[in-house]
Amino acid sequence: MASDSALQTPPHPVPGLRASAATSQGIGLFPGCPDLVGTPFSYGREEEIYGEGEQAEFVYKVVEGAVRTHKVLSDGRRQITGFHLPGDLFGFEQGEAHRHTAEALSETRVVIFMRRSVERAALRSAEVACQLWGMAASNLRYAQDHMLLLGRRSAVERVAAFLMDVDERLGRTGTFVLPMTRRDIADYLGLTIETVSRTLTQLEEDGALLRTGGRQVSLRRSRIGRVVEA
Amino acid sequence: MASDSALQTPPHPVPGLRASAATSQGIGLFPGCPDLVGTPFSYGREEEIYGEGEQAEFVYKVVEGAVRTHKVLSDGRRQITGFHLPGDLFGFEQGEAHRHTAEALSETRVVIFMRRSVERAALRSAEVACQLWGMAASNLRYAQDHMLLLGRRSAVERVAAFLMDVDERLGRTGTFVLPMTRRDIADYLGLTIETVSRTLTQLEEDGALLRTGGRQVSLRRSRIGRVVEA
DNA sequence: CGGTGATTTGAATACGTTCAAAACTCGTGG
DNA sequence: CCACGAGTTTTGAACGTATTCAAATCACCG
């Protein structure tokens, strides 16, 4: 399931000193932050990147593909806390252990950084620390919007808002292929797969979107926008 | 409704240069951060501290009392994103405008800081920036736990988890007076006031807690803990 | 002690869930 | 290129939890 890259040692790579050797492919942690260079790595569909409770050694940046992070209750109920698309950072924890499980939705390429070195960089440079702060704050904003969705929105509103969000993050073309299953969508929106499916059907009947094949959707922005409004 | 302090000009104070004069009462932003001194201020029960969309000029730290922050949909549905008790910081935004509304639950004393000067301090000092990062990260963790609660937990689980959380933050005595109304609890847990009330009754019948008067509760930690488990 | 707002309780309803089965997709191999 | 088959998605029907609407009770302040 793992990629065939010679650099890999799944499931938990140790970049060590190889980071500098990877400079050609390496991508900086932040736009203007050339000294922190990551090691490329990749994961196969449904592959676990790290599990809840594991030592949080690395930080990850998506290059290609998509990742989900989630939490689970002991009886299996699952809440996806976020989908991470190219350019997004994930896996950063304050404590020693990961507080989520992260899995690749599809064949996914990332670059990884040692958490320790990022933290050291933050301690030395106010600029780096501010970027990390900004990142956490932006994730917080996102989480709070999602709290409003989970706590107070109806099924149609959740699904419509979700589709608009995905469209946005995928380039606002209005037409895209959902990178996740119905189960993932349901576990992200606090619904069941059946409700997600029924709601999609309803939105299509209302002319808010068109479906061609299981995952492909085209939004009628004006119509679907009216569903969310409030 | 505002306090009778001579320093006040409700609802939106301008501390300006008075900050240094307030040193005697002033409380630093962080434990080891003596150069950022706030101006004391207070608000009456149900008084708005700032509104969503307003210019985010200040940052607040609760000294006494309690504050709620929330978001509202145009039709009035409300989601409380957090309760802030003594010691907690709130009102920090990344952008120019507040993304929530903040209100005092009861007579509340805070110290306020100019956002600009905190930001300037962060730019200068990696240590301050790291503290702010840590704060945002901790809020994020909290928000993500709450997402799991809102998305996947039943009414009893939500109420039980809520009571245990309040107990924790109020000193783990097991006995306390809820500082908020049923409506606040409902809007925090994504339920209705009726459901919160019924659930409280049910928990009492199950022997998980005792109620003496509207807001006073005593938890049977072992019993109520079993409700949340998962 | 009265009055107002908060809380609780009751009954009917609705929305989303659950369980079950059919239909569709898409990758694989013939 | 088509057929197969596993997994995913859709649809259907019954059910359950939480909501809604309504009214009674309670708590607290003056």
Image: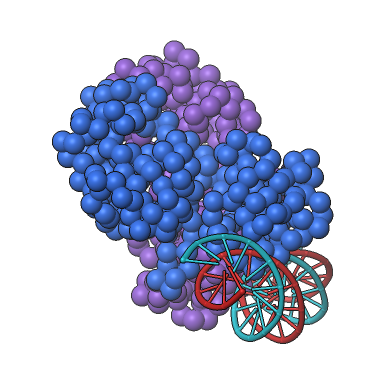
Chain colours: A purple, B blue, C red, D cyan
Q: Position of residue C19 (x, y in %)?
A: 82, 66
Residue in view at x 27 percent, y 55 percent:
B11
Q: Nearer the viewer, residue B154 or B192?
A: B192
Q: Which quarter shows the N terminus of chain B? A: bottom left
Give the left or right position of residue B81, taking residue B20 as reference.
right
Give the left or right position of residue C7, taking residue B14 as reference.
right
Looking at the image, the residue that sits furthest to the left is B17
Q: In which quarter of the image is residue B155?
A: bottom right
Q: In this view, does B114 lie above or below B217?
A: above
Q: In which quarter of the image is residue D25?
A: bottom right
Q: Is residue A158 visible?
A: no
Q: Can residue B193 be seen in this view?
A: yes
Q: Nearer the viewer, residue A105 or B36?
A: B36
Q: Where is residue A46 in the image (x, y as percent from the top left)?
A: 62, 43
Give the left or right position of residue A12, taking residue A89 as reference.
right
Residue in view at x 23 percent, y 24 percent:
B124
Q: Position of residue A111 (x, y in %)?
A: 44, 30
Q: Position of residue B138 (x, y in %)?
A: 48, 36
Q: Which quarter shows the C terminus of chain B? A: top right
Q: Which of D17 and B179 is in front in this view?
A: B179
Q: In this view, does D24 lie above or below B19?
A: below
Residue in view at x 66 percent, y 54 percent:
B159
Residue in view at x 42 percent, y 67 percent:
B73
Q: In this view, does B149 lie above or below A161?
A: above
Give the left or right position of residue B154, taking residue C5 as reference.
right
